[in-house]
Image (tube, rainbow, N blue to C red):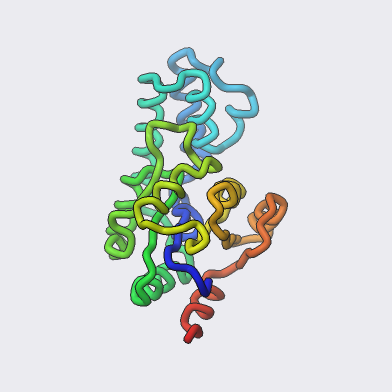
Amino acid sequence: MARTRVVLWDFDGPICRLFAGHSAEDVADGLVEWLEGRGLHHLLTESERESLDPHVVLRAVDRLRPGSDLVAELEERLTQEELRAASSAMPTAWADPLIRTWTALGLRLAITTNNSPRVVAKYLTGRGLASCFTPHVYGRTQELQLLKPHPHCLHRALRATGSAPDTALMIGDTPSDFLAAREAGVPFLGYARNERKEKLLRDAGATSVVNSLETVLRVVRERP
């Protein structure tokens, strides 16, 4: 952290629990039912249908129908569900003060996420945090093959902020965040709100993991 000049935040996890009041499992089930209602259940394997992860459903359809109107409509349906979820998202403990402290210290902050940038903007505006990140919000685009673990959104953030990878820090809570950071050459700090999350991160190769952002905030405030 001593040489960090720009912090790349994943959104759902380190900043908030997006689906705290609007189940991601229900969203995934809704996308599967929507496909089945159009006779397109064959686009998903059994494990994909049962994944309970809307991004798994979206990626699966994009692999078979890349760039299609079907994928665009499915992505928009997911975005609308994410926008609904943003209204009941639960802020991650200590994230807001950490964001404000880093901003006050002059660090540049960016969002690098697989969620829609429209959702990020809605949440940050509601928390009064938009000015801490604007214009550096890099989220899901129509090019779904570039979602993390592909480092595309990290590369976009680094280019836009004029930052070298070794002067950045990525904060994420999933193996895909870690893998994207490793591919981009960006130091990675894992945030794990429970033991299961920590095990997934460490099994992926992450070596620096905290269970509370208070730990990070304390280090930042104690730096000379």
Image spot of residue 162 (x, y percent): 37, 57
Q: Quadrant of residue 60?
A: top right
Image spot of residue 209 (x, y percent): 63, 64
Image spot of residue 156 (x, y percent): 40, 47
- Identify the residue at image location x=44%, y=24%: 34
Q: Is residue 16 visible?
A: no
Q: Quadrant of residue 15?
A: bottom left
Q: Does 66 appear above or below 149?
A: above
Q: Does 143 appear above or below 100?
A: above
Residue at the farthest top position: 39
Image spot of residue 119 (x, y percent): 34, 47
- Identify the residue at image location x=48%, y=61%: 168
47, 170: nearer the viewer: 170
Residue 128 shown left or right of residue 165 in the figure: left
Q: Does 103 appear above or below 192?
A: below
- Identify the residue at image location x=35%, y=32%: 76
Q: Does 44 appear above or below 87?
A: above
